Structures are given as C-alpha cells and as structure tokens.
Image: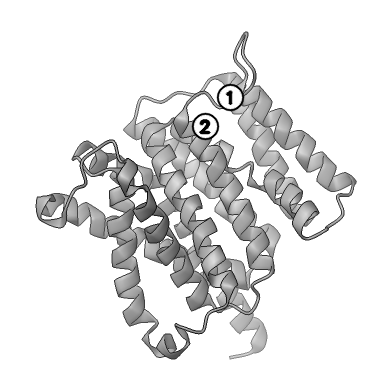
Amino acid sequence: MPLSRLNTAHSGIASAGLLFGAMCWGTVWYPYRLLEQAGISGTVASIYTYSLSILLGLILFYRHRHAAWKQPLNFYMLGIAVGWTNLSYVLAIIDGQVMRVMLLFYLSPLWTLILAKFFLHEQINFQRYLVIFVSLSGAALMLWQPGDLPMPRNTAEWLGLSSGIGFAVSNVITRHSKQLSLSAKTMSVWLGVVMVSLLFVPFLSMPFAWPHQISLHDWGLIVIVTMMLMLATLLVQYGVTHLPATQATVLFMFELVVAAIASYCLTDEVMTMREWLGGMLVVSATLYAAITHSV
C-alpha cells in the first residue's frame, strides 16, 4: 500500500477512535449514576471498572510484561495525576449538572498554561494570555450568581474543576514522559484510578458494595462501563498519537455535543442562556489554544 494511502487509513481510524472516545466520555456518566442508585458509589464503581480494565490489560499487554517493573518515576506520577482526574470527574458527573461539570473540566488549557509557566519555564505570549483571559471570562460568566463571587457552587463543581487541574498536571508530566510507550501510559491510567480510589474508601458516605452484594444486572453495567473506558482509553491514545493536536482537540470536543444531547434526553437538566454563553467562551478558548498550539 502506498505511504499516502497508509497515512490516510491511519488518520481515518484515529479520527473514528477519537469520536468514539468522545461518545464514551459524553455518556459514561449515566451508567455510573445508575450504579450509584443501586448502592454502588462512584468510588467503588471506579475500583471495579478499572480493576477489570487492569486484568484485561494484563492479557492485552502480556508481551510487555518484562518491562512492567522497569517503569520510571513518571509512570507513577502520571498514574496519580490521571487517577485523580478520572475519579474526580466520575464523582462530579454523578452528583453535579453534567454540562457545567464538563465545561469546568474544559478549563484545563488554562491550568496547563500556568503549570507550564512555573514548572517547564515556558514563556506566556499574547496568544496564551488571550486563552487565559477568555477562559476566565467564560468561567466567571457561567459561575456568576447575583450577590456571590463567580465560584463553583457545590462539591460536584469543585471536583469538576479539580479534574481539569489534574488533567493539566498529567499533560505537563506527559511532556516529560516521551519515553513511555502507549501500553505503559494506558496501564498507568488504570492503575492510577484504582490506587487513588482505594485511598478514598475510608471516607465513603455509602457502605462499600462487596462483589457478592452486587446483582447480576449491576455487574453487567460494570462490565459495559469497563469496556467503554478501555476502548475509549486505547482509541483516544491512538488518535492523539496519529493526528495533529489541533484536529484531535476539535474531534474530542464532540464529547460536549454528546453530553448535551444525553443530559437533555436522560435527565431534566437545563442550562441557562448565561451558562451557555460562558460555556461557549470556555470552548472557544480551548479550540483557540489548540489551533494556535498555545498548550
């Protein structure tokens, strides 16, 4: 096959992978909510779904087993950062308004710029200052309430905001982790979520749901979520590896479209015009950062 056709094929698969990943992340909140209604908290559900991912990953990446104990420190740092990112995101979308949580998460380019400035000593030019200004303006507009400061209004929104910060931290770590393979990054994500989730088990407000206490129906949901997360992780990693960062960012923001439709159809959540306008500014800042390679 000619090289041009091979590259086109890779790009097509990568694009489809990113769109599928966006669909997964835009809808995965719903089965997590169903599991919590069945008495399985988001933390416990994350332990089960990502533990199953690890077990299946051990089979999938079996040929890389000899390198399992030779990972650098960045492997574990990335795991902790992404572990918190994923867990806080899950907890936020279970209890919070889906679109507000997601838009708060999409402030991550703002935090990436700030962290890159202080830890990677990257210069902030006019384009980056513009991203910061537009992101903060969008967040302020979306969060503003008469008589109150424009701050997150509940625990779920604080978790959504912290998830975006965790994602920014993981971006900075990834820039120092070019030696990590796709399989190492993927396993780091899954291990990190389980480790961070286990740390929060003593603080659960709901009883821990042990395996024998979970119904067959709920186990089915856990398996479905596991497969969604596994495929999303692998396909997104493949997508960002084989596509320009700008194109990958634009495609993955399809998640917001999916989430908006899903939250409208599956819940009674409605965003105000002011929240939509603030969200549009946040999304615009993210797209501008991708187009101008500001982050």
Compared to residue 237, the image places residue 280 above or below, namely above
Q: Nearer the viewer, residue 231 or 12?
A: 231
> For residue 152, what is the image quadrant?
top right
Dot 2 alpha-carbon crowd within 10 angstroms: few under 14, some 14 to 19, many 20 or more: many
Percent position of residue 41, x then y:
28, 43
> For residue 107, what is the image quadrant?
top right
**Which mark is on residue 100?**
2
Q: Residue furthest right?
A: 126
Indicate the amino acid at tag 2.
Arg
Compared to residue 262, the image places residue 169 above or below, namely below
First of labels 2, 1 by sequence position:
2
Indicate the amino acid at tag 1.
Glu
Q: Secondary structure at mark 1?
A: helix
Q: In the shown orientation, is residue 223 left or right of residue 54?
A: left
Q: CA distance from mark 2 to mark 1?
A: 8 Å
Identify the residue shown where x is 60% and y is 23%: 143
Percent position of residue 136, x then y:
72, 32
Identify the residue shown where x is 64% and y is 72%: 177
Q: In the shown orientation, is residue 42 left or right of residue 288?
A: left
Residue 15 in view here = no
Q: Residue furthest front?
A: 202
> Do labels 2 and 1 touch, CB within 8 Å?
yes
Compared to residue 193, the image places residue 27 above or below, namely above
Identify the residue shown where x is 72% and y is 41%: 285
Identify the residue shown where x is 68% and y is 46%: 111
Q: Secondary structure at mark 2?
A: helix
Q: In the shown orientation, is residue 45 left or right of residue 105?
A: left
**Which mark is on residue 275?**
1
